[in-house]
Image (cartoon, helix red, strand yellow):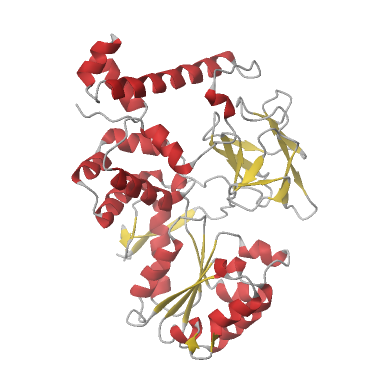
Amino acid sequence: MEDSKSRTIVIPSVAPSGGAGQKPKLLVTAGPLEGREYVILKFPYTIGSGLTNDLSIADSTVSRRHCEITVDMNGALTINDLGSTNGTAIEGVKVTSARLSPNTEVQLGRTRIVVPLVQDRPELTMSAREQFGNSIGRTPLIRHVFHLAEQAAACDSAVLLLGESGTGKEELAEDIHNESARKDGPFIVLDCNAFASLEQAHRELFGEGEVKGALELASGGTLFVDSIDRLPADAQPLLLRALETRKDIRFIAASCQDLGAMARDGAFFAPLQYALAVIVIEMPALRRRKDDIPVLLTSIAERLHVSDEIREWCEQAATIAFLRRYNWPGNIREMRALLERLQSLGRIPADLGVFLRGETKLEAEETPEEAGFTVSADRPFKDLKNELIEDFERRYLSDLLARNAQNISQSARSAGIERAYLQRLIRKYGMRNTD
């Protein structure tokens, strides 16, 4: 008999990287080569805009020899900046050399690349549900998360939530608590980002004087330890001891880092990692589940009680199409911030692309040439020409609509173009059509 709660499906792996008998791969998640993957056949593997690189990218914000990827005797990958103009950044921090953890996105100018996590078993067991508490989604990836969350809610085992910042780890932890036998008990959050010393971590965990610590506060409920990779090393054995002895508390931890890799490198207390990783749930980045954008927009809009105008905008096909083209480096948190900002603004901006880039401040350092008209012959003629034309069209439309109070017919007459053609351009660039 088929389980009414879940079923198993087979989906293509995201891009297996470095498994047994496999060569590691790179997936380009943004830039001129977005969506393409490349096998790393040799080391060092060079990346840049020059044609002699192993991966040549026609991106004016990428230096001719921008960076290289090397491998050590254990198979670990490292990315090294080669003195590039705009730098190599991981999670917004520029680095000269850094270990490449699975699914960590690296930014090179406008281009972003990732070494996908190995998927040895592409079979995913999905929940029949499309919503788990406040977490919502229809794609196989997130419904697999719901299946694991259902298993977690049915027991008291420790749970380790992994994933990029903003993917909804804390919300899922609270959803697991609310569907568990401990739902009537407290849900206590311990944020390790705030710890400046072992003394502070000890005080937050165990309390001091009449002030209760997180362990006492969580008795009978759930303790959610956020950013556990930032817990001071000396405090990690103390948390392990509590996890092993305090049966009155359910422990859920979250990390943006690969705790297993950190433990192997000696950067995290391995026994604590083993104790936490009873049920491991990886929260997928929003760019890996873009088919969930419509339901996420609707759900966030309802929870924020946005205006009718913004709610209608969220449901428009042009809005969905435009937001699907965006890469969402801040994941669901960025989407929520976008709607909050629109709500505070009280209207939909004419040029959503500019508004969105201003929201996230993407590539402000990497694109100083945007202030003027700069041409470089190190890129294919067709690519650069199309980019410049698109930039002109976007800027022209933004000014045109502003001059004509967003009136489509009046704007078309003013520009001397057909109204239908103007509407196609507006949809292309995610600009508001109020006519």
Residue visible at 62% across and 76% down in the picture: 272
Which residue reaches farthest right? 73
Q: Position of residue 372 (x, y in %)?
A: 54, 20
Is 338 above or below relative to 283? above
Quarter of the figure that contains the C terminus: top left
Q: Residue placed at 33% from the left, 52% from the top?
A: 138
Q: Residue furthest top?
A: 416
Residue 41, percent from left and from top: 72, 37
Visible residue check, residue 435: yes
Q: Is residue 179 visible?
A: no
Q: Which residue sits at x=52%, y=88%? A: 246
Q: Is residue 223 above or below residue 7?
A: below
Q: Eyeballing the image, is 182 above or below 375?
A: below
User: Is 156 on the left-hand or right-hand side of 194?
Assistant: left
Q: Is residue 302 left or right of residue 289?
A: left
* Residue 177 on image: x %, y %: 38, 74
Relative to the observer, which residue lies in front, 3 or 79?
Answer: 79
In front here: 214 or 59? 214
Instruction: Give the total number of marks visible in the rendering.
Output: 0
Residue at x-position 54% and y-position 81%: 205
Which is nearer the eye, 336 or 72?
Answer: 336
Q: Residue furthest bottom?
A: 209
Vertical placement of residue 368 versus 185, above or below: above
Using the rendered view, name the quadrant where residue 258 is placed. Answer: bottom right
